Amino acid sequence: MKEKATIASPGRRDFFRKAGLGVGLVGVAAATGGRAEAAEVAGEKAGENAGGYRKTEHVKRFYASARF
Amino acid sequence: MAAGADVSRDIAEEETLRAEVYRLLGWLLRGPPDAAGLARVAGLGGDDGELGRGIAALAAAARTVTPEKVNEEYHALFIGVPRGEIMPYGSYYLTGFVYERPLADLRSDMGRLGIARADDVHEPEDHIAALCEMMAGLIVGTFGAPADLAAQRRFFDAHIGPWAERFFADLEAAPSAAFYMPVGAIGKAFMRIEAQAFAMAA
């Protein structure tokens, strides 16, 4: 069974917070106007310069929705 | 992992924030934001560090730039005729040419990770916007289970680390960069943060 994606070690957490990835970082999730799978609709914004991606068929059943 | 499982509980807050920064960068680099997008960017805020100052500068820029201007700027920077001021492709930064070995290596890894380019996309996958989106997806589990740190690091070290900080520095200094100048500053600061954090190991 796959273990947790990341182990939130105190050192790593503190480093990120000191670097600015903490409570002071406001509005980032909402700025793109969508959720994690926003890349699938990115093409409609950029037109000919789009470089989006999608899941391959066999992993779609494992699709996970992000909370942002 | 069961289909539809909510992985957010398994992902630490700071890791989600990393993904959100990658997603922000990917969104801004994929194309110029429209008026609604600029309004959302105007609401961003950061702390007093290098990353936070870049975020604040971007929000300030978003409050004064017009959609028309940012569209022109994006085209001058990245599209141009015959090319923009900046070539945002890994192959270009690593070999001097687009569609080179770095792209082939990326496609190989994408295949293993279950990431595929959308059918209507014509840009090579080693475009910085696509790579940012891929990192965000690996962190939160868009392509399957969330990638563990070792897998994220392998992807970062192979496809982003070797060139992205230089790209963002070039973007920050590009002649046409105004709104995209703080995008460069944010990306540069964030790439350094990512590299340092990966070097710290688990």
Image: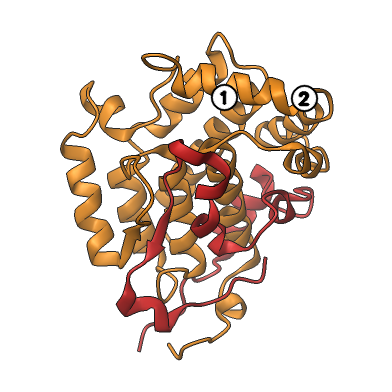
Chain colours: A red, B orange
Determine which quarter of the picture holds residue B74. top right
Q: Position of residue A21 (x, y in %)?
A: 67, 50
| Tag 1 secondary structure | helix
Vertical position of residue B71 compared to residue B16: above or below: above
Residue B111 shown left or right of residue B12 in the figure: left
Residue drawn 47% across the image and 70% down it: B141
Q: Position of residue B200 (x, y in %)?
A: 44, 52
Residue drawn 53% across the image and 22% down it: B75
Label 1: which residue? B74
Provide the chain ID for the residue under circle 2: B
Dividing the image into 4 quarters, which one contains the C terminus of chain B?
bottom left
* Residue B66: mark: 2
Q: Nearer the viewer, residue B106 or A44?
A: A44
Residue B13 shown left or right of residue B78 in the figure: right
Vertical position of residue B8 compared to residue B80: above or below: below
Residue B180 visible in the displayed image: no
Determine which quarter of the picture holds residue A2. bottom left
Look at label 2 and name its amino acid.
Answer: Thr
Q: Position of residue B167 (x, y in %)?
A: 43, 26
Residue drawn 81% across the image and 28% down it: B60
Q: Nearer the viewer, residue B112 or B188?
A: B112
Dividing the image into 4 quarters, which one contains the N terminus of chain B?
bottom left
Badge 2: how crowded within 10 Å, few (<14), some, or many (20+)? some
Q: Position of residue B159 (x, y in %)?
A: 31, 44
* Residue B54: mark: none
Vertical position of residue A2 compared to residue B114: above or below: below
Between disc 2 and disc 1, whose residue precedes? 2
Look at label 1 and name its amino acid.
Answer: Tyr
Residue B113 shown left or right of residue B164 in the figure: left
Provide the chain ID for the residue under circle 1: B
| Tag 2 secondary structure | loop
